[in-house]
Image: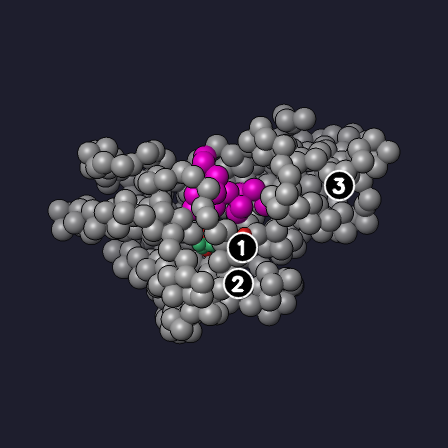
Amino acid sequence: MGFGRPSQPATTRIATARAGSNIAFIKYWGVGDVTLNLPLNNSISMTLGDLYTTTTVEWLHPRLLGADEVSIDGRVQTGKAAERVVRHLDRIRAQAGSVDRARVVSRNNFPIGSGIASSASGFAALTVAGCAALGVNVERDRLSALARRGSGSAARSIYGGYVEWERGTDDRTSIAHQLYPADHWPLLDIVAVVNAGEKAVSSEDGHRLALSSPFNSARIGTLPAALSEVRAAIATRDLQRMGPIIEQDALAMHAVMMTSSPSLVYWQGGTVDLINAVRRWRTEGILAYFTIDAGPNVHIICEEAQRMPIMERLRALPNIHQIIVSGPGDGPRLLDTHMV
Ligand code: DP6
């Protein structure tokens, strides 16, 4: 699989993988085929080096473990969250023709459920660890397709650096690929956390509502040009070219969310304050642009030279609970130390 696999005896059916979250510059919003998780549009993201999930998967014979067990951030999962992981374990089992049960222990180093995509890093790490522990040799684009079934944005976290997920038309073609490695462009994502609570409507449910918005087709119509601009801006490391497009697409996605039936409003007051602040800072010579996922938190995209002035300004604003900074990172890797 090419993840720098430490050697292990064939009898050991355990593996641990670490995968970075990612921040999309052109967003995935809206699902066409719910079963295969085929998106309505291509998306482009940067894999994050400092916001990641580490997941251990241990496979055991059903005699030793009656049912899959899932623990995330120290809590045993039940209900919807556990079912979603078990459905993904079923897909991994199907790859290997296995009936084993899994013990899954997963930890995030950032608040989950708040618009920082824990599902991206979580399902990427689960896919890589789950397949490695079963000893199945899965090509990287197949891992991306498999991760996509767990969570759309996880398809992109199978690669490091700058990544595009092709919408595709079926399970084989809806996969991500790397545009450039992490060291191509050391951008920063400064996440201003307005609220770290769980969001009321998951993106999984939200994606199904996109087609109900009259603005969805208008947004999709803008994307061929936006995607090629973002690709070109990344190629030439041109933030001034990329920034206005990523802001526009984040706003277009939230316009779709707000005008879906039922309507989804992820923003809070602090979100709007930050949008205005970033725009004001630009008039003061700070080259930075915002993007917002399915939550209230604002991701500020800039280069290293702007880190300090932005941090100072953020610290002076009220109602910011946490500031998290990440540069681009590499794709998933296997670790020697396990958590079970
Ligand atoms: C707004 O990948 O979290 O962050 O496939 O249901 O897990 P599921 O959705 P998810 O959606 C991401 C939505 C987004 C935009 C993006 O990351 O492209």
Query: According to the image, label 3 marks what residue?
Result: 135
Label 1 Cα crowd, 10 Å radius (few <14 / some 14-19 / many 20+): some
Residue 255 image offset from top left, x and y in percent: 35, 63
Query: According to the image, label 2 marks what residue?
Result: 208
* Above-or-below relation of 178 to 3: below
Q: Secondary structure at mark 2?
A: loop
Amino acid type for the residue under numbered disc 3: Gly
Whether tag 1 and tag 2 are in contact, CB under 8 A, the answer is yes
Magenta-tinted stretch? 110-123
N-term mark: 3 or 1: 3
Q: Secondary structure at mark 1?
A: helix
| Residue toward you, 326 or 80 | 80
117 in magenta: yes
11 in magenta: no
Q: Which mark is residue 106?
A: none
Give the left or right position of residue 159, taking residue 4 as reference.
Answer: left
Q: Which mark is residue 204?
A: 1
Q: Is mark 1 within 8 Å of ligand 1?
A: yes
Q: Name the residue at 46% across, 48% down.
A: 200
Question: Which quarter of the figure is the N terminus placed in?
Answer: top right
Amino acid type for the residue under numbered disc 1: Glu
* Above-or-below relation of 177 to 6: below
Label 3 Cα crowd, 10 Å radius (few <14 / some 14-19 / many 20+): some
Residue 282 image offset from top left, x and y in percent: 18, 50
| Residue toward you, 103 or 81 | 81
